[in-house]
Image (cartoon, rainbow, N blue to C red):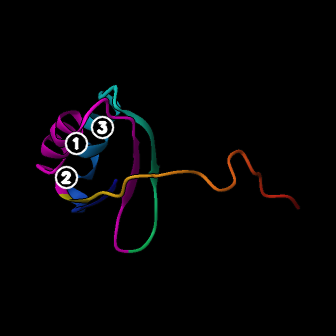
Amino acid sequence: MRIRSTSASKRALIEAATKMSQIIELVCVTGEDCLIARVAARSVEDLANVLERLSTYGHTSTSIVLGSMNRGRRCSR
């Protein structure tokens, strides 16, 4: 889930997201969005609940992973 918020609501967004068991990873990014959350939802209703709760802090956009093409691959130097 990509999340775009204002700087005024970013701290509250991070606090809310880190308390949600469905959020398994939260990273800060540059660009249009300010955060990307990796969500593990049990159902469509569970995902809708996460979206509803986090959309109070900004604009959310979701994509659903259908499969992984290179699971566990690491960047090498």
Mark sitting on residue 9:
2
Distance between mark 1 and mark 2 Cα atoms: 5 Å
Q: Nearer the viewer, residue 23 or 6?
A: 23
What residue do we see at 12% from left, 44% from top? 52
What residue do we see at 30% from left, 37% from top? 17
What residue do we see at 38% from left, 56% from top? 35
- Residue 33 spot, x, y in % from top left: 34, 66
Task: Tell me which corner region of the image, top left, top right, bottom left or bottom right, holds residue 48.
Answer: top left
Give the residue pinned by disc 1. Answer: 12
- Residue 31 spot, x, y in % from top left: 41, 74
Disc 1 element:
helix
The amino acid marked with disc number 1 is Ala
The amino acid marked with disc number 3 is Ala
Q: Nearer the viewer, residue 18 or 75?
A: 75
Q: Nearer the viewer, residue 14 or 69?
A: 69
Distance between mark 2 and mark 3 Cα atoms: 12 Å
Task: Tell me which corner region of the image, top left, top right, bottom left or bottom right, holds residue 32.
Answer: bottom left
Disc 2 element:
helix
> Which quarter of the rendering shows the C terminus?
bottom right
Query: Which of the two marks, 3 or 1, is nearer to us in this view?
Result: 3
Q: Residues within 10 Å of mark 2 (few under 14, many from 20)?
A: few
Which region is colored magenta?
A: 32-58
Name the residue at the bottom extreme. Answer: 31
Distance between mark 3 and mark 1 Cα atoms: 9 Å
Tell me which numbered mark, 3 or 1, is placed earlier along the sequence.
Answer: 1
Q: Residues within 10 Å of mark 1 (few under 14, many from 20)?
A: few
Q: Residues within 10 Å of mark 3 (few under 14, many from 20)?
A: some
The amino acid marked with disc number 2 is Ser
User: Is residue 43 toward the left or the right of residue 35 in the image?
Assistant: left
Mark sitting on residue 17:
3
What residue do we see at 40% from left, 54% from top? 36
